Image (cartoon, helix red, strand yellow):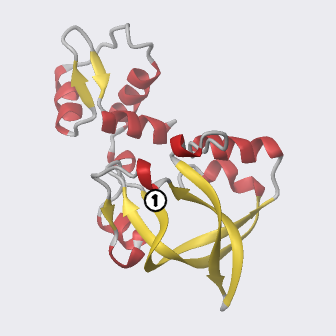
Amino acid sequence: MVHFDRVAKYVKSCVPARARGTAYRLPVGYPVFLDEGHDGVEGQVLELEAPTVLLALLDEFHGVMPTHPAKSLFHKKEIDVETAGTVKKVFAYVVNPSKLPRTAKPIENGDWRSELDRAPAVTSTLTERQTEYVRRLGSSTGREIVPINLELYRELMKLDLIVDKGRRLALSKLGRDVYRYLS
């Protein structure tokens, strides 16, 4: 789970689970779950003892928009999962099928852990210098010029994280996704 360290102190229990559906790998490298398909996707059921505001922040982080579900990046849905031989209903963040990028790739057999071991997410492969620049550029207003040296410029262009807008640099679509996961 991305940013697990930020919610870890609220985790009351964590149990391995399996859900029917399909795991996809986003271009940024992280997996998402779609409750359509027949793979058994491994995951975890977290029982949280958290303030309501944390649950609202998790919904916001996942782009859940209860008043405009069609615009939501994810839907918070009640799904069936199997844990220790029993089936139970839990809430899960399920990617909105209409928001799943065309470039997302299905993960064979739903084994997203092996997939991440094979090819880590972009955010975990960046150097400290690259990470800092993506953060600076992502938090800029868009009108300001964020200085960069030529070597770093080439590295980030090669990774498709930035685009050259002539007088200034900006994050590419992938760069914005990386920034979102770094925040």
Residue density around tag 1, few if under 14, some if 14–19, many if 20 or more, within 10 Å: many
Apparent side of residue 44 relative to residue 181 in the rendered image (left or right): right
Q: Residue at x 54, y 51 (%)?
A: 74
| Relative to 35, residue 143 above or below | above
Of the pair 111 and 34, the residue shown nearer to us: 34
- Residue 129 lies, in percent from the top left, at 34, 31
Give x and y (percent) for residue 17. Answer: 60, 78
Q: Residue at x 47, y 73 (%)?
A: 21
Residue 11 placement (x, y as % from top left): 74, 60
Q: Position of residue 152 (x, y in %)?
A: 23, 28
Q: Quadrant of residue 144?
A: top left
Q: Quadrant of residue 80?
A: bottom right
Instruction: Please name whichever residue, 17 or 105, is drawn nearer the observer in this view of the structure.
Output: 105
| Amino acid on which the number 1 mark rests in the picture | Val
Q: Residue at horizontal 42%, vertical 25%?
A: 138
Q: Is residue 4 above or below residue 163?
A: below
Q: Residue tagged by mark 1?
A: 32
> Which residue is the extreme one toward the bottom?
85
Q: Secondary structure at mark 1?
A: strand
**Residue drawn 47% across and 21% down?**
139
In the rendered view, would you say 148 is above or below 81? above
- Relative to 71, say whether 85 is above or below: below
The quadrant the N terminus occupies is: bottom right
Answer left or right for 62 relative to 177.
right
With 77 as the anchor, is 29 left or right in this view?
left
Q: How many marks?
A: 1
